[in-house]
Amino acid sequence: MLATITDGEKLENIPGIMRQRMIMTFKESAFSRELLQERLDDLVEQDIFRPDCLIVDGYDFTGSDSSRLSELCSYMAERGLRMIWFSAVSHRNEERKSDSGVPAPGHDVEELFDNILLIQPQGEEISLDILKCDSKTVSAGVSLKLDPSTMLLKKG
């Protein structure tokens, strides 16, 4: 994706971007506000890294209650993180959904998120459905198509 948006530059030719990212791993069962706070505070205090956005991939929505997730989101907002992305796995056979159509496991915590997207395969295409968009820049219910080879929006 970086090569596409930077006119074909190879990732190794973009050291500035590479210096502005950090990957941290946590045990899924041990991930908490306290642990994230400790790690981020250490990085900031030592002037190693100061994040602007955060991607939490693989958060255990089913093994955590909404209050833990709410605490985590509150901490991120307190830190001034402008963009926070959580990913969740929604199973095809899962029938639980919120009134607005958000599938489990996010169906009972959707109020914590400004935007909710659902990515799902549909035949040879991948559909990106916008289930919630509080900024009103895109209406909920809009569906876009993604190119399965690049995961970028398809033209036309």
Image (cartoon, rainbow, N blue to C red):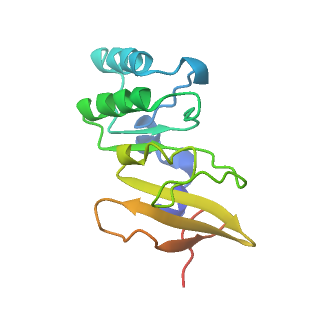
Place residue 78 in its image quadrant. top left
Q: Residue furthest bottom?
A: 156
> What residue sits 30% from the left and 37% below the top?
81
Give the camera-side residue of 106 and 25.
106
Residue 64 in view in this figure: yes
Place residue 63 in its image quadrant. top right
Percent coordinates x, y for residue 46 in the rendering: 31, 14
Q: Is residue 143 left or right of residue 68?
A: right
Q: Is residue 95 left or right of residue 67?
A: right
Give the camera-side residue of 23 and 140.
140
Work out which quarter of the rendered image holds the C terminus and state it. bottom right
Percent coordinates x, y for residue 61 in the rendering: 55, 35
Against 102, residue 58 (above or below) is above
Work out which quarter of the rendered image holds the N terminus and state it. bottom right
> What residue sits 51% from the left and 60% below the top?
101
Percent coordinates x, y for residue 148 in the rendering: 68, 65
Against 65, residue 128 (above or below) is below
Percent coordinates x, y for residue 90 in the rendering: 63, 49
